[in-house]
Amino acid sequence: MERRSLLVSVFIYAAALLLAVVIVAPVFWLFVMSISPAADLVARPLNWWPSAVDFSRYATLLSSIPNSAGANFVASLVNSVLVAGMATLAAIALAVPAGWAVSRTPSISWSLSLVIATYMLPPVALAVPLYMALAALGLLNSVFGLALVYLTILAPFTTWLMKSGFDGIPREIEQAAMMDGASLLATLRIITLPLAMPIVATSALFAFLLAWDEFFYALLFTSDQRARTLTVAIAELAGGRVSDYGLIATAGVLAALPPVLVGLIMQRALISGLTSGGVKG
Amino acid sequence: MSSTWMTTRAWLLMLPLLIIMTAVIGWPMIDTVRLSFTGAKLVGTGGAFVGFDNYVKMLSSNNFQRALFATTWFAVISVTAEMVIGVLAALLLNQQFYGRAVLRALLILPWALPTVVNATLWRLIYNPEYGALNSALTQIGLLDSYRSWLGEPGTAMTALIVADCWKNFPLVALIALAALQAVPRDITAASLVDGAGPFARFRFVILPYLAGPLMVALVLRTIEAFKVFDIIWVMTRGGPANSTRTLSILVYQEAFSFQRAGSGASLALVVTLIVTVLAVGYGMLVRRTAGSSA
């Protein structure tokens, strides 16, 4: 490492402090709002530090008293879990065989490129026919309909992840097993799939979070508690006439918890997944 | 095993994915093209063939031109800012200092936040009556009276861009940081011996390693920015006075608020075409950059 002058060191620490504040301050403020008494949040100037710590909004939102703000929130939470869960399971079921096939048969890899290229399609280009089709099938405002639509996003993404995962498993292992007389299916079940489980798990996690974040299709295709997801519920809270800003902040904190926790815990996997394509060019 | 059988088997394994993709992407795409030549409404039957009427009407409308400008402005400014701030953050994180690992971990935070939560958070910060920005600026004396940051056409777009940058610069920073760590130490050391200043070092030694990965980040971010909907819908719904109405918002309004499926579809296809041209153009650029820097 090169020697640094004192001035450069001071500059580096000042910049690091600035970056830390820029990153943390908005998120921290969201949390502070969620635990501040309502009066603190409508003070001028604001009470930056809560006069009393108040976690009651978390209890309010997670309660299931009928027709309360909590019941609405819990229903949307359940819908988000259901939609993201079903879409993830379906995406993985499609992606594992397809990813393996492309990984082992390079001559058909153009078909995967085609599937991945759909990533650049703006959702608005598909929205109108999807809306009409869901309406015709009676799948508007249904968690099943929304999960099906989410496959447009999740399936290409998971197939691409699975394909790169299978690329890392040497095909010689499979060939050795087959040489010993195992059938293809047995080889895949006994040898390949267990080796691929970490990739399956990572893909499923990312797919789940992708569906958890989705807003546009959920806004279009759901209308009430039966299917409305968390993102739509929060957008409605934020845009509506809620008198307590802390309640909006609390909903935000709760919705952000799963992806933020996963992000912090799985950092390494996330960054290597993110950058492997980028760095290799 | 014969290679024809291998290929057939591979196609069979691909089949479920291809069927679903055809159903949820391929067919809707084709149907959007069909709809764009009709006067179809979102609900009910009908929708006679109208030729290129929808396209002519949409492309010549003032709304489209304003939305195209708003989208381009949003994309260019926010992506440029994200690239600059992201690279600066990566250069900083590539230095040695106490707390570097913690700071790097924190970088995930804005990026992991769901877009809707991010939009909601900034909407609260910009709140005209009780927002944190108003309060903070007044307290340090930079502002005389509270302002409606999202309610004035002059500031709404900038406020949106700041919120978008805050969420997305970490992605650029993470990609740039990984690329920086691939720069061989002896090369930077040699450039020091040769007397290269910090700027020359960045331009001639570090930038070639960064160029490829940064191009990929640029492509991804630009495509995302051109498709932008969520953050704008939650923060301003395209207002005030349509100053933040981007193309995706305009399509939404046309097809779903006004239920004009035909003209909405034609507009959606124009957006698709713009994004595709961008993606293909960038793709060629990426290939050239990757070729020249590798």
Image (cartoon, rainbow, N blue to C red):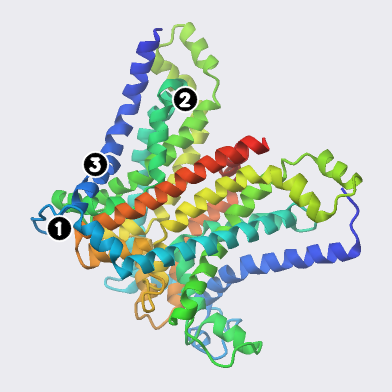
The answer to the question of whether label 2 and label 3 lie on touching residues, with beta carbons closer than 8 A, is no
Determine the CA span between mark 1 and mark 3: 19 Å
The residue where tag 1 is placed is B39
The residue where tag 3 is placed is B27
Q: How many marks?
A: 3
Q: Answer yes or no: is residue B223 visible.
A: yes
**Between A69 and A167, the one nearer to me in the picture:** A167
The residue where tag 2 is placed is A103
Q: Residue at x 25, y 57 (%)?
A: B55
Q: Of tags 2 and 3, which is closer to the observer?
A: 3
Q: Residue at x 9, y 58 (%)?
A: B44
Disc 1 marks a residue whose amino acid type is: Gly
Q: Residue at x 82, y 40 (%)?
A: B187
> Which image quadrant is residue B258 in?
bottom left
- Look at the picture and state if A131 lies above or below B254: above
Q: Secondary structure at mark 1?
A: loop
For the residues beneath circles 1 and 2, the answer to whether they share a chain is no
